[in-house]
Image (cartoon, rainbow, N blue to C red):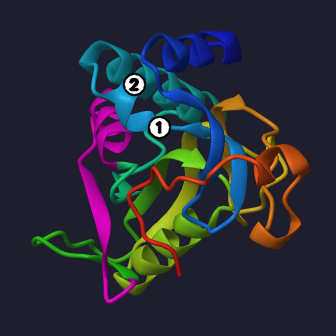
Amino acid sequence: MTKDEVLAHYRATGALLEGHFILSSGLRSPMYLQSARVLMHPERAEAFGRALAARVVASLGRDPVDVVISPAMGGLIIGHEVGRALGKPAMFTERVDGVFTLRRGFALEPNTRVLVVEDVVTTGKSTKECAAAIAEHGGQVVAACSIIDRTDGEVSLGLPYFSLCGLKVPAYDAENLPPELQEIPAIKPGSRGLK
């Protein structure tokens, strides 16, 4: 799946938004990728999952992981689809008192090989926090992937990372907005509150 094909899916479903957005990190951006809008279509979610799984297998070899784990909320659907494409279980971490953990009876055997799957990576914070939770539960994160990399290859996660689409989307501190964003009211479309 090419970058243009990924963006065509986002545009066709109204998942690529333009305006003034407050990201989960607290940064501001003129573009927001509302992955839930594209992933609500099972055929599109399945296509993304298969494409990500193929990219992981091409880079890491056949049977590279034992389980897929995603940070809730954004990674839930795409993580499930990547797990399905790889033929592996898909679990998720969720925040308890602001910290990712495994709940709902999810458990890992020592040294379980884990692939972390996200919808969009902006700063890598959620991926790193998810990886830390996996390590606390005895798992070994071997790689991470996402549909979209908002840094276009600049993010450093400290492990192999694959995406279907790299975009260089600017993000600004609230105190250093360009004039065009200063004139637009900011909205917070994501699932996680600000810190």
Q: x%, y% of residue 161?
A: 67, 48
Q: 148 and 104: which one is in front?
A: 148
Q: Please name the residue shown 61% across and 50% down the image.
A: 21
Q: 186 and 173: which one is in front?
A: 186
Between the residue at mark 1 and the residue at mark 2, the CA separation in whole angstroms equals: 8 Å
Question: Residue 60 is drawn in which quadrant?
Answer: top right
- As helix, strand or loop, the secondary structure at mark 1 comes to loop
Q: Residues within 10 Å of mark 2 (few under 14, many from 20)?
A: many
Q: Amino acid at mark 2?
A: Val
Q: Which mark is residue 38?
A: 2
Q: x%, y% of residue 171?
A: 78, 54
Q: Are marks 1 and 2 in contact (CB under 8 Å)?
A: yes
Q: Residues within 10 Å of mark 1 (few under 14, many from 20)?
A: some
Q: x%, y% of residue 157?
A: 70, 63
Is residue 32 shown left or right of residue 136?
right
Q: 110 and 185: which one is in front?
A: 185
- As helix, strand or loop, the secondary structure at mark 2 comes to helix
Q: Quadrant of the N terminus?
A: top right
Q: Amino acid at mark 1?
A: Gln
Is residue 109 shown left or right of residue 147?
left
Question: Residue 123 is drawn in which quadrant?
Answer: bottom right
Is residue 41 shown left or right of residue 128?
left
Q: Please name the residue shown 66% across and 13% down the image.
A: 2
Q: x%, y% of residue 164?
A: 62, 28
Q: Please name the residue shown 28% across and 40% down the image.
A: 80
Q: Which residues are magenta?
A: 76-98
Residue 78 magenta: yes
The residue tagged 1 is 34
